Amino acid sequence: MADEKTTQTTSKPAKKKVKGSNRIAKWFREMRSELKKIVWPTPKQILNNTVVALVVIVVAAVVIWAFDQAAAQGVRALISLGG
């Protein structure tokens, strides 16, 4: 008996070739559609969020400054004990 190898060719359906300009145009249309869905904040919300952010920044800065001062005092105390 002879071993016969059967070759089967599977034909895939041909994909539509989309031109580059059509792809770009589609991307811009979809982007425009998505941008229309955005709910932009009101000026009052922007002001409120800005004030909240600035307060948090100031509080964080004060906490870091206080920790730095305490650490510096601790280092000075250790140095004065040794010398």
Image (spheres, rainbow, N blue to C red):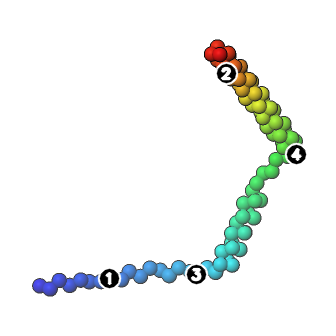
Q: Are marks 3 and 1 in contact (CB under 8 Å)?
A: no
> SS class of the residue under badge 2?
helix
Q: Residues within 10 Å of mark 3 (few under 14, many from 20)?
A: few
Q: Which residue is mark 2?
A: 75
Q: In the rendered view, does 52 fall on the left or right side of 22?
A: right
Q: Residues within 10 Å of mark 2 (few under 14, many from 20)?
A: few
Residue at horizontal 65 percent and vertical 78 percent from the top: 20
Q: Is residue 63 visible in this depiction of the protein?
A: no
Q: Amino acid at mark 2?
A: Val
Spatial CA span between label 2 and label 1: 80 Å
Question: Residue 76 is drawn in which quadrant?
Answer: top right
Task: Looking at the image, tell me whether mark 4 or mark 3 is earlier in sequence order.
Answer: 3
Indicate the position of residue 39 as horizontal and vertical percent values: 78, 51
Q: Are marks 4 and 3 in contact (CB under 8 Å)?
A: no
Q: Nearer the viewer, mark 2 or mark 3?
A: 2
Q: Amino acid at mark 1?
A: Gln
**Which mark is drawn over residue 43?**
4
Look at the image and tell me in which quarter the C terminus lies.
Answer: top right
Q: Which residue is mark 1?
A: 8
Task: Looking at the image, tell me whether mark 4 or mark 1 is earlier in sequence order.
Answer: 1
> SS class of the residue under badge 1?
loop
Spatial CA span between label 3 and label 1: 26 Å
Look at the image and tell me in which quarter the N terminus lies.
Answer: bottom left
Task: Looking at the image, tell me whether mark 2 or mark 3 is earlier in sequence order.
Answer: 3
Q: Amino acid at mark 4?
A: Pro
Question: Residue 12 is drawn in which quadrant?
Answer: bottom left
Indicate the position of residue 63 as horizontal and vertical percent values: 74, 27
Q: Which residue is mark 3?
A: 17
